[in-house]
Amino acid sequence: MDSREAKYMKISDELRTEIVLGKLKEGAFLPTEMELMRLFDAGRSTVRHALAILKEEGLIEIRKGSGSVVLSRPEGILIQRPGRGMNSFSVEYHTENYSGSAVTSAAIEEVDADEKTAERLGLKPGSGVYRIQRIWSIESVPYNYMVQFLPADLFPMLREKMKNSGRIADIMRESYGLVPERAEEHISAKNADFIEANLLNVEIGTALLYTYRLGFCKKGIYEFAEFYGNPAYTGYVAQLEEL
Protein backbone atom coordinates (compact mmCIF):
# COMPACT_ATOMS: atom_id res chain seq x y z
CA MET A 1 0.00 0.00 0.00
CA ASP A 2 1.62 3.30 -1.05
CA SER A 3 1.26 6.53 0.95
CA ARG A 4 -1.26 8.00 -1.48
CA GLU A 5 -3.53 4.97 -1.19
CA ALA A 6 -3.21 5.00 2.60
CA LYS A 7 -4.11 8.72 2.66
CA TYR A 8 -7.41 8.44 0.76
CA MET A 9 -8.38 5.44 2.90
CA LYS A 10 -7.59 7.41 6.05
CA ILE A 11 -9.76 10.31 4.89
CA SER A 12 -12.72 8.08 3.99
CA ASP A 13 -12.37 6.10 7.26
CA GLU A 14 -12.35 9.22 9.42
CA LEU A 15 -15.29 10.85 7.65
CA ARG A 16 -17.22 7.57 7.78
CA THR A 17 -16.61 7.36 11.53
CA GLU A 18 -18.06 10.85 12.02
CA ILE A 19 -21.15 9.79 10.09
CA VAL A 20 -21.48 6.48 11.93
CA LEU A 21 -21.24 8.16 15.35
CA GLY A 22 -23.66 10.91 14.39
CA LYS A 23 -21.14 13.75 14.53
CA LEU A 24 -22.06 14.46 10.92
CA LYS A 25 -25.83 14.06 10.81
CA GLU A 26 -28.10 13.42 7.84
CA GLY A 27 -28.35 16.60 5.79
CA ALA A 28 -25.08 18.03 7.10
CA PHE A 29 -22.37 19.11 4.67
CA LEU A 30 -18.86 17.70 4.83
CA PRO A 31 -15.92 20.12 4.87
CA THR A 32 -15.16 21.47 1.40
CA GLU A 33 -12.52 19.86 -0.78
CA MET A 34 -10.14 22.71 0.04
CA GLU A 35 -10.75 22.28 3.77
CA LEU A 36 -10.17 18.52 3.55
CA MET A 37 -6.99 19.07 1.55
CA ARG A 38 -5.71 21.36 4.30
CA LEU A 39 -6.87 19.18 7.21
CA PHE A 40 -5.33 16.00 5.82
CA ASP A 41 -2.41 17.55 3.92
CA ALA A 42 -3.65 15.79 0.79
CA GLY A 43 -4.02 16.59 -2.89
CA ARG A 44 -7.35 17.22 -4.59
CA SER A 45 -7.38 13.86 -6.39
CA THR A 46 -6.79 12.04 -3.07
CA VAL A 47 -9.67 13.90 -1.40
CA ARG A 48 -11.98 13.24 -4.35
CA HIS A 49 -11.10 9.53 -4.27
CA ALA A 50 -12.05 9.40 -0.57
CA LEU A 51 -15.35 11.18 -1.23
CA ALA A 52 -16.09 8.85 -4.13
CA ILE A 53 -15.80 5.87 -1.75
CA LEU A 54 -18.35 7.40 0.62
CA LYS A 55 -20.64 8.20 -2.30
CA GLU A 56 -20.40 4.60 -3.56
CA GLU A 57 -21.31 3.38 -0.06
CA GLY A 58 -24.43 5.53 -0.14
CA LEU A 59 -23.34 7.73 2.76
CA ILE A 60 -23.04 11.03 0.92
CA GLU A 61 -24.26 12.82 -2.19
CA ILE A 62 -21.84 15.05 -4.06
CA ARG A 63 -23.70 18.14 -5.27
CA LYS A 64 -21.94 20.17 -7.89
CA GLY A 65 -21.48 23.72 -6.70
CA SER A 66 -22.74 22.95 -3.20
CA GLY A 67 -20.50 20.26 -1.72
CA SER A 68 -20.95 16.82 -0.21
CA VAL A 69 -24.02 16.20 1.96
CA VAL A 70 -24.63 13.29 4.36
CA LEU A 71 -27.48 11.03 3.23
CA SER A 72 -27.76 8.48 6.02
CA ARG A 73 -25.96 6.56 8.77
CA PRO A 74 -24.88 2.94 8.11
CA GLU A 75 -26.69 -0.04 9.58
CA GLY A 76 -25.44 -1.31 12.91
CA ILE A 77 -26.06 1.78 15.03
CA LEU A 78 -26.63 0.82 18.64
CA ILE A 79 -29.19 2.53 20.83
CA GLN A 80 -27.82 4.99 23.35
CA ARG A 81 -27.29 3.24 26.66
CA PRO A 82 -26.73 5.37 29.77
CA GLY A 83 -24.11 4.10 32.17
CA ARG A 84 -20.98 4.87 34.11
CA GLY A 85 -17.97 5.45 31.90
CA MET A 86 -15.84 2.70 33.43
CA ASN A 87 -14.65 0.60 30.52
CA SER A 88 -11.17 -0.48 31.46
CA PHE A 89 -9.35 -2.48 34.09
CA SER A 90 -7.49 0.50 35.55
CA VAL A 91 -8.69 3.73 33.99
CA GLU A 92 -10.59 6.22 36.14
CA TYR A 93 -12.66 9.12 34.90
CA HIS A 94 -12.88 12.13 37.18
CA THR A 95 -16.67 12.34 37.10
CA GLU A 96 -17.27 12.81 40.83
CA ASN A 97 -17.96 16.52 40.43
CA TYR A 98 -20.19 16.04 37.41
CA SER A 99 -23.50 14.38 36.66
CA GLY A 100 -24.94 12.63 33.64
CA SER A 101 -21.96 10.50 32.58
CA ALA A 102 -23.27 8.28 29.78
CA VAL A 103 -22.55 6.52 26.52
CA THR A 104 -23.98 9.11 24.14
CA SER A 105 -23.13 7.43 20.86
CA ALA A 106 -22.22 3.89 19.84
CA ALA A 107 -21.88 1.93 16.62
CA ILE A 108 -20.75 -1.50 15.40
CA GLU A 109 -19.71 -2.64 11.94
CA GLU A 110 -17.78 -5.56 10.43
CA VAL A 111 -14.61 -4.53 8.59
CA ASP A 112 -11.36 -5.98 7.28
CA ALA A 113 -8.48 -5.72 9.75
CA ASP A 114 -5.72 -3.34 8.72
CA GLU A 115 -2.09 -4.23 9.39
CA LYS A 116 -1.95 -2.67 12.88
CA THR A 117 -5.21 -4.26 14.05
CA ALA A 118 -4.27 -7.63 12.59
CA GLU A 119 -0.88 -7.55 14.30
CA ARG A 120 -2.41 -6.65 17.67
CA LEU A 121 -4.99 -9.47 17.44
CA GLY A 122 -2.60 -12.03 15.95
CA LEU A 123 -4.59 -12.23 12.70
CA LYS A 124 -3.74 -11.97 9.02
CA PRO A 125 -4.35 -8.52 7.45
CA GLY A 126 -7.78 -8.47 5.86
CA SER A 127 -9.31 -10.86 8.40
CA GLY A 128 -12.85 -10.00 9.45
CA VAL A 129 -13.17 -8.04 12.69
CA TYR A 130 -15.95 -6.16 14.42
CA ARG A 131 -15.20 -2.48 14.98
CA ILE A 132 -17.14 -0.97 17.87
CA GLN A 133 -16.99 2.75 18.51
CA ARG A 134 -18.31 4.60 21.54
CA ILE A 135 -18.28 8.14 22.89
CA TRP A 136 -18.74 8.89 26.60
CA SER A 137 -20.00 12.29 27.70
CA ILE A 138 -20.38 14.21 30.94
CA GLU A 139 -23.17 16.77 31.00
CA SER A 140 -23.32 16.48 27.20
CA VAL A 141 -19.56 17.15 26.87
CA PRO A 142 -17.66 14.25 25.20
CA TYR A 143 -14.65 13.17 27.23
CA ASN A 144 -13.67 9.71 25.95
CA TYR A 145 -13.68 8.07 22.52
CA MET A 146 -13.11 4.32 22.18
CA VAL A 147 -12.48 2.09 19.16
CA GLN A 148 -12.65 -1.63 19.96
CA PHE A 149 -11.81 -4.52 17.61
CA LEU A 150 -12.95 -8.12 18.12
CA PRO A 151 -12.19 -11.10 15.82
CA ALA A 152 -15.30 -11.98 13.82
CA ASP A 153 -14.43 -15.70 13.92
CA LEU A 154 -14.43 -15.62 17.71
CA PHE A 155 -17.72 -13.73 17.95
CA PRO A 156 -20.08 -14.88 15.16
CA MET A 157 -23.35 -12.92 14.90
CA LEU A 158 -22.06 -10.35 17.41
CA ARG A 159 -23.99 -7.45 15.89
CA GLU A 160 -27.31 -9.19 16.45
CA LYS A 161 -26.42 -10.12 20.03
CA MET A 162 -25.40 -6.55 20.87
CA LYS A 163 -28.87 -5.27 20.03
CA ASN A 164 -30.04 -6.61 23.39
CA SER A 165 -26.94 -5.86 25.44
CA GLY A 166 -24.02 -3.53 24.87
CA ARG A 167 -21.69 -5.10 27.46
CA ILE A 168 -19.06 -7.21 25.72
CA ALA A 169 -18.10 -9.04 28.92
CA ASP A 170 -21.71 -10.15 29.48
CA ILE A 171 -22.11 -11.28 25.87
CA MET A 172 -18.81 -13.20 26.00
CA ARG A 173 -19.96 -15.19 29.02
CA GLU A 174 -23.61 -15.72 28.09
CA SER A 175 -23.36 -16.28 24.33
CA TYR A 176 -19.85 -17.60 23.71
CA GLY A 177 -18.79 -19.18 26.99
CA LEU A 178 -15.69 -16.98 27.17
CA VAL A 179 -14.38 -15.22 30.27
CA PRO A 180 -11.95 -12.27 30.15
CA GLU A 181 -8.90 -13.32 32.15
CA ARG A 182 -6.44 -10.43 31.95
CA ALA A 183 -5.54 -7.33 29.99
CA GLU A 184 -2.48 -5.31 29.05
CA GLU A 185 -2.75 -1.55 28.75
CA HIS A 186 -0.19 0.72 27.12
CA ILE A 187 -0.49 4.40 28.00
CA SER A 188 0.99 7.40 26.22
CA ALA A 189 0.13 10.88 24.98
CA LYS A 190 -1.19 11.66 21.51
CA ASN A 191 -2.06 14.87 19.71
CA ALA A 192 -5.65 14.89 18.51
CA ASP A 193 -6.04 14.48 14.76
CA PHE A 194 -9.03 15.59 12.68
CA ILE A 195 -11.45 12.88 13.75
CA GLU A 196 -10.49 12.79 17.43
CA ALA A 197 -10.66 16.58 17.71
CA ASN A 198 -14.11 16.67 16.16
CA LEU A 199 -15.50 13.79 18.21
CA LEU A 200 -14.16 15.18 21.51
CA ASN A 201 -14.82 18.84 20.65
CA VAL A 202 -11.20 19.92 21.12
CA GLU A 203 -8.72 21.67 18.87
CA ILE A 204 -6.63 19.65 16.42
CA GLY A 205 -3.29 19.01 18.10
CA THR A 206 -4.71 18.97 21.64
CA ALA A 207 -2.81 16.52 23.87
CA LEU A 208 -4.95 13.47 24.64
CA LEU A 209 -4.38 10.55 26.98
CA TYR A 210 -4.04 7.60 24.60
CA THR A 211 -4.35 3.99 25.72
CA TYR A 212 -4.40 0.78 23.78
CA ARG A 213 -5.54 -2.40 25.45
CA LEU A 214 -5.19 -6.08 24.64
CA GLY A 215 -7.70 -8.39 26.30
CA PHE A 216 -6.98 -12.09 26.85
CA CYS A 217 -9.19 -15.13 27.42
CA LYS A 218 -8.42 -18.86 27.30
CA LYS A 219 -8.53 -18.80 23.50
CA GLY A 220 -5.96 -16.03 23.30
CA ILE A 221 -6.35 -12.35 22.42
CA TYR A 222 -10.02 -11.48 22.06
CA GLU A 223 -9.80 -7.67 22.00
CA PHE A 224 -7.74 -4.75 20.76
CA ALA A 225 -9.11 -1.42 21.94
CA GLU A 226 -7.93 2.18 21.67
CA PHE A 227 -9.05 4.96 24.01
CA TYR A 228 -8.67 8.70 23.45
CA GLY A 229 -9.34 10.66 26.64
CA ASN A 230 -9.62 14.35 27.35
CA PRO A 231 -7.01 14.84 30.10
CA ALA A 232 -9.31 17.33 31.85
CA TYR A 233 -11.44 14.32 32.84
CA THR A 234 -9.10 11.36 32.58
CA GLY A 235 -6.39 9.96 34.85
CA TYR A 236 -4.86 6.65 35.91
CA VAL A 237 -4.41 5.07 39.30
CA ALA A 238 -1.95 2.18 39.69
CA GLN A 239 -2.22 -0.23 42.61
CA LEU A 240 1.15 -1.80 43.45
CA GLU A 241 1.64 -4.94 45.51
CA GLU A 242 4.84 -6.42 46.88
CA LEU A 243 5.68 -9.77 45.23
Image (tube, rainbow, N blue to C red):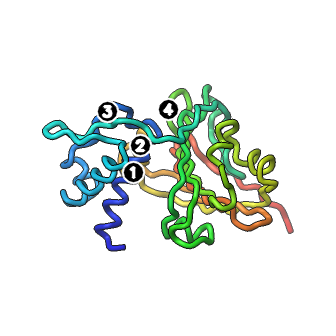
Q: Position of residue 56 (x, y in %)?
A: 33, 50
Sooner in the amino-acid sequence: mark 3 or mark 1: 1
Given residues 17 and 240, the one toward you in this image is 17
Which residue carries the number 4 mark? 141
The mark that comes first in sequence, 4 or 3, is 3
- The local crowd at label 2, few if under 14, some if 14 to 19, many if 20 or more residues have their Cα within 10 Å, is some
Q: Which residue is drawn at 80% across and 50% down?
A: 173
Numbered disc in front, either 4 or 1: 1
* Residue 53 in view: yes
Mark pair 2, 3: CA separation: 11 Å
Q: Residue 28 carries which label?
A: 3
Q: What element carries label 3?
A: loop
Question: Dot 3 surroundings within 10 Å: few (below 14), some, or many (20 or more)?
Answer: some
Q: How far apart are marks 4 and 3 (CA)?
A: 21 Å
Residue type (three-letter) at the residue carrying disc 1: Glu
Considering only order in the chain, which callout, 2 or 4, is on the residue closer to the N terminus? 2
Query: Which corner quadrant of the image does residue 65 belong to?
Result: top left
**Does 206 appear above or below 242?**
above
Q: In this view, does 48 lie to the left or right of 115?
A: left
The tag earlier along the polypeptide, 4 or 1, is 1
Mark carried by residue 18: 2
Please indicate whether residue 162 sits to the left or right of residue 173 in the image.
left
Q: In this view, does 182 lie above or below 202?
A: below
Q: Is mark 2 on a helix, strand or loop?
A: helix
Disc 4 vs disc 3: which is toward the camera?
A: 3
For disc 1, the marked residue is 14
Label 1: how many Cα within 10 Å (few below 14, some 14–19, many 20+): some
Q: What residue type is labelled 2?
A: Glu
